[in-house]
Image (cartoon, helix red, strand yellow):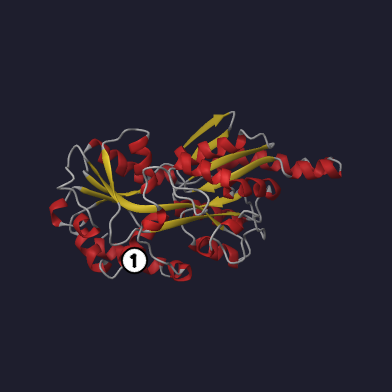
Amino acid sequence: MTEKKTDKGVTRHAADTPREAALTRRTFIGSASAAIAAGASVGTFSIIGRAQAAASGTVTMYTSMPTSYSAPVAAAFNKLGKGITVNVFYAPTYQALQRLEAELKANRVLCDIFLIADPGPFLNLKARKELLDYVSPEAKHYGKADRDKDGLWVNGRTVATMFAYNNTKLGAKDAPKTWQEFADAKWTGKLGGIDPRVGGTGYSWYYVTRNTPSLGVKWWEKLAKTKMLLTRGHGALMDRMVSGELPVTEQLDYAVYINIKKKKAPITAVYPPEITPVTIAPIAVIKRGPNNAAAKVFYDWWLSKAGQEVVRDIGGVYSARKDVAPLAGKPAYDTLKVMDIDYESYLKDRKKLTAEFVKVFGL
């Protein structure tokens, strides 16, 4: 586990290995102290001063958005001079959730803002009244599929799952073009993909393709026979694909876009015609977080047109806001074949489907 201190705040993240990914209490001491200090100062000001102080201090965001993207977004907000400093803690989706749940159980909550790539846990948190009863004025700019019916969470970033290949190892003629071709036996030992048990986008990939009639469980059984390398993060997959170790890997649209545009990586994106699994990553204010007032300011900014443009430009993702255009070079979102998901079932079926995946892959 590493910690990087800058004048823009503190960024903490868990690595992809199980040992390094363990989230310890020590990791959070810095954020806790700052948040408590900010809250403790409120009572010493006049009425006007209290209002200003309430929307100042430190905000801690727990997120599954990789540090290389989430930290620069937080830094962009910090530069606005609102008197609020956002610190970021990164961990894979279900590890971040595990940490938040542990804090809620202990009633020692350090998280102000929660953003992970799985809407299911937000349904559970809302049902338990752990989300702040706050509707951002920006929520009206999002469609019904991208926000809670009562407005307590909103889709903070939209991630598409696809695959990519190393174009120095494969020509366009030989590379797979569909999910069916991706799982062809000729790629045995040459494929990589995210483990659906670890991350929200991994579960989304399994859930959507498994429930697509032309693919289904049989497709996953076919894929398992290729001995596809499973990893805990897409960064490891990207490294292996760029190096040529794995010529074809399942990927996320934003990672492929950033690596092509900014790093000139020798890779080509493929959006399979059968289906594009899309994961929405809700963002919400945690009610028992130490700094609700400042968290609301950051939450509103993240969902605003300006905030979403920063998230898009730094993170390479799609925005659910209709007034935020996709990045040049990416297909328009409405041209992708996507699935309408019942998130109640999505949450309810997770344990059953991950067990099914384990059986299919013989893990």
Kind of residue sitting beneath label 1: Ala
Label 1: few (<14), some (14–19) or many (≥20) C-alpha neighbours in 10 Å: few
Q: In this view, does 1 lie above or below 318?
A: above
The answer to whether residue 34 is visible is: yes
Picture residue at 59% right of the left edge, 64% below the top: 126
Residue 317: image location, x then y, percent: 44, 47
Quarter of the image where one finds residue 197: bottom left
Q: Is residue 207 above or below residue 83?
A: below
Q: Which residue lies furthest to the top in this view?
A: 7
Give the residue at x 33% y 38%: 260
Q: Residue 118 at x, y = what percent?
A: 46, 58
Visible residue check, residue 203: no
Quadrant location of the C terminus?
bottom left
Where residue 345 sits: x, y (%)? 44, 71
Task: Report the front residue among 62 and 150.
Answer: 150
Q: Residue at x 35, y 64 (%)?
A: 208
Q: Name the residue under label 1.
A: 355
Q: Quadrant of the N terminus?
A: top left
Q: Name the secondary structure under disc 1.
A: helix
